[in-house]
Amino acid sequence: MNRRKSIFAAGLATTVSALALTVGGVAAPAMALAGTVDCDGWVHNNNPDHGIAGCKNNTDRTVTFRAEVVCGRAFDVSGQWVTLAPGQYNESSAVCPIYSTGVGGVGWTIE
């Protein structure tokens, strides 16, 4: 009998935790950034192994971002973290290893 109560209690705790996560997930969009962070990625004109991401912070708070460069036939690389104050623009870049086939794409991560 005690085993059934334990299983029921564990199931109830799991259900309560799932509901708490769902309610927490609903509240998250209300805390979204005012404005957006506009970013663009490109390959350097003179070096096909060099990927660059540039971002402008149009929000009302400080954000941090970095370039995420996809390298052909090599490991992907990440650029340096760059902190942007509201209204500021800056760039982050990374270079693929010499044995890669060049930049396959440039993305970014924003925190």
Image (spheres, grey):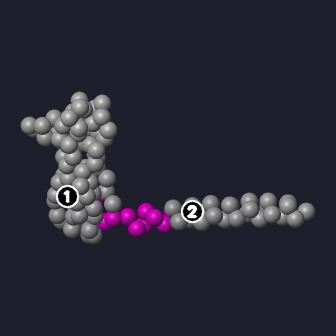
Residue 36 visible somewhere in the drawing: yes
What residue span does the magenta drawing correspond to?
A: 26-36
Residue 98, image x and y in percent? 20, 35
Residue under the point 27% across and 61% down:
64
Q: Residues within 10 Å of mark 2 (few under 14, many from 20)?
A: few
Residue under the point 62% across and 60% down:
18
Tell which circle, 1 or 2, labels the residue nearer the N-terminal end: 2
Residue 44, image x and y in percent? 13, 40
Q: Quadrant of the C terminus?
A: bottom left
Residue 103, image x and y in percent? 23, 36
Disc 1 marks which amino acid? Lys
Judge whether 13 appears above or below 99 on screen. Answer: below
**Residue furthest to the left:** 46
The local secondary structure at tag 1 comes to: strand
In the drawing, what numbered circle is on residue 21? 2
Disc 2 marks which amino acid? Leu
Determine which residue is flagged by label 1. Answer: 56
The local secondary structure at tag 2 comes to: helix
Residue 83 falls within the magenta-colored stretch: no
**Residue furthest to the right:** 1
